[in-house]
Image: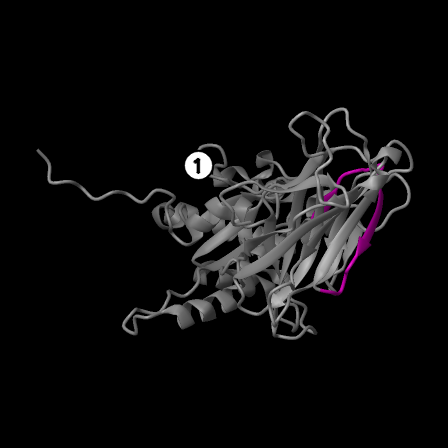
Amino acid sequence: MSSEHTIAVDLTLVDEGSRKIDTAPDGVRIGAVSLGMWQEDVISTPSDMSDDWDTYLIRINYELALEPDLPPLRWFEIGADFASDSPEPAFVVDALPHATSAPRAPTSYALNRYLALVPTDFDSSAAAHVPGTTDVINVFGIGRGAVRWQHSSPAGGVLQGARSAWAVLAVPKGRVKQTVEFSVRYAVESDKAVDYRPTQQPVSFTLTLSATAQSREAVETQDSTDPAEPPPASPPYVFISYAHDDARRKANALRFGELLRRCGIDAHLDQWDCDERGDWSLWAIRHTREADFVIVLASPMCKAVGNGEVDYKTHRGLQTELGQLRELLHSDSEQWVPKILPVVLPGERVEDLPLFLRPYTMDHYLVDEFTREEIEELLRVLTRRPRRPRPPLGPGA
């Protein structure tokens, strides 16, 4: 979310003459709903969806704060309008939390092929996590350009505090700035407030989107004013080597590969090359030798295979891949040490990297969530962009 200042919507009671209700000698608001930083992650647009759209998973952080010694709120509602000022509005494909009429335990959700958020048991491979709540929640606007969540409480009023919501947002392809109008509605739990009506002033802000690689390239080309500027370098070619320990780890490898490709990295792994019969050992050798980088994903089976703790019949494909990497490191470590990158995905441990990769005496890369921010250090290595460029030498004394 692009804003240098806190974004908040004040909650104020006014009478029919638009006077603020006096709750202190100087008058005071009854509370506010403020926004934290929103998080956005570009996601793959389904193949059967129109090519006219880019899709994002947006996390919306907001907090209700109430003044002390005032009546509680019977309910409050936040709204995010993505279609208020554009002839080509964005729209919400799905949103969390879903409607609930009873207390709900913390739940993790994954995206299915239709971009619907569905509950999942695999927390580390989930796209979104929703904390438990005692609120009664209604959600409105899914499938349209504006979405609203209404929180209410059966007794005692809704509690103040921080909450979060998620929206799967489709925007016209190539859009990198999205206007959002944020609004709040509410009702006060007090007979004394019957002569007053609640009011608020919506706030608009700009959400900066990370367009897909193809869309971003098109926008940058349109914005370029220097016809002599050289074309961008080809994306780094990355081969992902991993063990099929179980379905969760296989799904995590796929999700990691998809994230890399959304970030402009030409990532390759076996799950995308199953459309025809072939020699997998030659396939692995070709990818390893042609890749700019080889990423090895930590897992218990990867460690066992890499350390020679399994028999020759177990995970033969991975034995071929890791055996070749050992050979290349031994024959030319100066070339191959910078090219082989150990990565630890969510739910895994550094201890589950093979010893020949030297995970403690050399760099490894931790990924706690499947977001661009979490792999920023890895992206800097893959694209050779140091966080702090080396300054030029001065003239000296």
In the drawing, does residue 199 fall left or right of residue 218? Answer: right
Residue sitting at 48 percent across and 50 percent down? 325
In the drawing, does residue 150 fall left or right of residue 32? Answer: right
In the drawing, does residue 270 fall left or right of residue 230? Answer: right
Displayed quadrant of residue 162: top right
> Foreground residue, 19 or 215?
19
Q: Quadrant of the C terminus?
A: top left
> Foreground residue, 268 or 48?
48
How packed mark 1 is, by other alpha carbons closer than 10 Å (few <14, some 14-19, many 20 or more), is: few
Residue sitting at 65 percent across and 60 percent down? 82
Tell me if residue 220 comes above or below residue 156 in the rendering: below
Can you give x and y, in whole percent of width and height, for residue 306 in the image? 57, 43
Can you give x and y, in whole percent of width and height, for residue 230 in the image? 31, 69
Tell me if residue 358 comes above or below residue 57 in the rendering: above
Can you give x and y, in whole percent of width and height, for residue 168 in the image? 69, 58
Q: Which residues are magenta?
A: 128-144
Q: Is residue 286 magenta?
A: no
Residue sitting at 41 percent across and 71 percent down? 221
Tell me if residue 32 comes above or below residue 137 in the rendering: above
Q: Is residue 143 magenta?
A: yes
Residue sitting at 58 percent across and 59 percent down? 179
Residue at the spot of label 1? 362
Can you give x and y, in whole percent of width and height, for residue 51 in the image? 61, 74
- Residue at the extreme left of the image, as rendered: 397
**Observer able to see residue 315:** no
> Foreground residue, 265 or 103?
103
**Observer able to see residue 183:** yes
Tag 1 secondary structure: loop
Colour pattern of the rendering: one colour
Q: Amino acid at mark 1?
A: Met
